[in-house]
Amino acid sequence: MSAGGRASLWRVSLLCRCPRCGQGPLYQGLLTIRARCPVCGLDLTGNDAADGAVVAVTLVLGTLLVVLAFIVEFTVAPPLWVHALLWPAIGTPLAVIMIRPAKAFLVAQQYRNRPDQMGQS
Ligand SMILES: [Zn+2]
């Protein structure tokens, strides 16, 4: 934890940790944010990450996958069913892997910029 009661923004985002102590896990399950940090007790119910991370990841990952699909189509030209199986199989786990740190980043940014909404003043 750095001075001022805030952990490094990039560290808490990439490791999906509490924005205050940097130790407690942010998620309970796959993408559900805990109500309270089990280490420092920070109230996380006021987080407002909403769909921001999902939209950003969808735009970036969707663009990347479409470009890759075109490359595969024009170089290998597989049957259509290969595309139908391949891209969801790649895109779904990648989306979850990317959404977790993106959502943690938004929660950490809210903690830094609007601490009154997360039980801080
Ligand atoms: Zn904490």
Image (cartoon, rainbow, N blue to C red):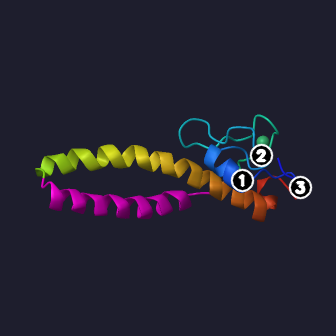
**Which residue appears at 58% of the width and 42% of the height?**
32
| Nearer-N-terminus badge (1/3) | 3
User: What residue is pinned by disc 3?
Assistant: 4
Q: Position of residue 45 (x, y in %)?
A: 71, 48
Q: Which mark is residue 46?
A: 1
**Which residue appears at 62% of the width and 48% of the height?**
14
The quarter of the image that holds ligand 1 is top right
On the question of residue 48 being in view, the answer is: no
Is 61 left, or right, of 12 in this rendering? left
Badge 3 crowding class, 10 Å Cα cut-off, few under 14, some 14 to 19, many 20 or more, is: few
Callout 2 amino acid: Asp
- What's the magenta region? 49-77
CB contact under 8 Å: marks 2 and 1: yes
**Which residue appears at 58% of the width and 57% of the height?**
50
User: What residue is pinned by disc 2?
Assistant: 43
Callout 3 amino acid: Gly
